[in-house]
Amino acid sequence: MSSHGAPIPMTSTPCGPLHGTAVVPGDKSISHRALILGALSIGETRIRGLLEGQDVLDTAKAMRAFGAEVIDHGGGNWSVHGVGVGGFAEPGTVIDCGNSGTGVRLIMGAMATSPITATFTGDASLNGRPMARVTDPLALFGTQSYGRSGGRLPMTIIGAADPVPVRYEVPVPSAQVKSAVLLAGLGAPGQTVVIEQEATRDHTERMLAGFGAQISVEDTAAGRVITLTGQPELTAQEIDVPRDPSSAAFPVCAALIVPGSDVLVPGIGLNPTRAGLFTTLRDMGADLTYENERLEGGEPVADLRARYSPDMKGIEVPPARAASMIDEYPVLSVVAAFARGQTVMRGVKELRVKESDRIDAMATGLRANGIAVDEGPDWWIVTGLGHGKVPGGATCASHLDHRIAMSFLILGMAANAPVAVDDGGPIATSFPIFEPLMGGLGAQLQRLEVAPV
């Protein structure tokens, strides 16, 4: 089943050229953080362009449960009346984070150094994902956690009554873990230090500085060292959310593989810790250009123009780039199927513990559609057939994973036969306008009838 109802089987039929402008929703990562930091600030934070997907709406609901006043003014305009650092109230109900690993892990961090208790749950996919990678470093602050075996939700977090600052080296590249520790550090006295050997998306650091936190970032021989001074008074801000590069990946990649396509995707955030996919596509020979480059809210932004690119070649993606495009590997693997030769992706074990095991899900579906895939614990290789040679024709399991569902629907737009997914419902968690947006460009997507039980 999808995360919020009965399964929604969908099919994608080979289509003609995609043309037009694809206005994708606001950035999911920034939307989560804007709501949480707004709730931890003093005053009214105004947010424009908030992503109104289910993941973010669940975070908004959680902030209300912790005592912040969160108001939807319509049209992506929201306001948050914060309670200040240390001001969270104990929620009276279980916090349901739906499908959002980002939401639950960041919220756990935000409440971990307040003397309150909260219980978290989610859908079947989220409840199967490991939380120890966050609860272990939170325990260093004095936080306690009690969950199911394997450190899984549902889980109760008891915030530290007398938190202490920590120094923590992130063992795997994870912006969620880093951000959870930094948010917990807000409530601890003294300096909390996070060290990451590989830089991950830095929206939390940028936004903390914007809200008035004393935070520094230094690149050293030991890695990237982030130092945060705890117990600040954060000041409410006005935030313009850039459009999500992870959502932009889908119309961009579709345009590259559907013959005759020319699609403009405006206002996309190109933070260097998030733009790895676009760099990789250009390395493969994609006709992908940046237009009207600019800064908005401290984040680099540009309009992306993607045109059909029949001469793309497989490459070895640098492992150091993985953290900047970890969510985009599924749709990259679809593009790789239409390139010539092998696309090698290494250093991607994080894909094994996302909403699904994304390597296994994509490998299984691609093979069913006639594409050769080799895989290992932290690597996979897609052997492309070139344009016009991808068979298609299979039904793929989405595993309650929005990015898996959308990736296979993109595959169906350029394969020789339609490609179906067993459940497109999870797409609403991050990209609620995916169907009408792609349909407006010329894609042929259809929801299938389900026989009554």
Image (cartoon, helix red, strand yellow):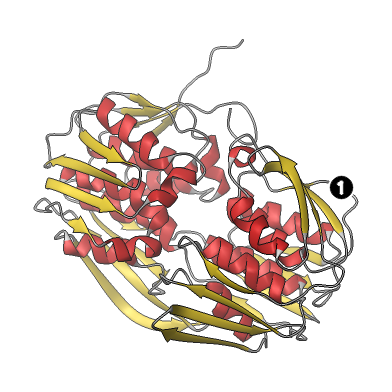
Residue 227's x, y, as percent?
59, 84
Horizontally, residue 8 falls left or right of residue 322, namely right
Horizontally, residue 156 falls left or right of residue 263, namely right
Horizontally, residue 193 falls left or right of residue 10, namely right
Q: Quadrant of residue 274?
A: bottom left
What residue appears at the point 26 percent right and 67 percent down from the top-left corner? Answer: 279
Of residues 29 and 233, the one nearer the viewer is 233
What residue appears at the point 80 percent right and 81 percent down from the top-left corner? Answer: 43
Residue 243's x, y, as percent?
47, 66
Judge whether residue 381 can be spotted in this image. yes
Give the answer, above or below, for where 86 lies relative to 335.
Answer: below
Judge whether residue 444 can be spotted in this image. no
Of residues 222 and 227, the one nearer the viewer is 222
What residue appears at the point 59 percent right and 45 percent down from the top-left corner? Answer: 130
Q: Amino acid at mark 1?
A: Thr
Mark 1 surroundings: few (<14), some (14-19) or many (≥20) residues within 10 A: few
Image quarter hosting the C terminus: top right
Residue 351's x, y, as percent?
42, 48
What residue appears at the point 63 percent right and 34 percent down from the top-left corner? Answer: 124
Horizontally, residue 66 falls left or right of residue 304, namely right
Q: Quadrant of residue 445?
A: top left
Residue 206's x, y, as percent?
55, 80
Q: According to the image, label 1 marks what residue?
A: 93
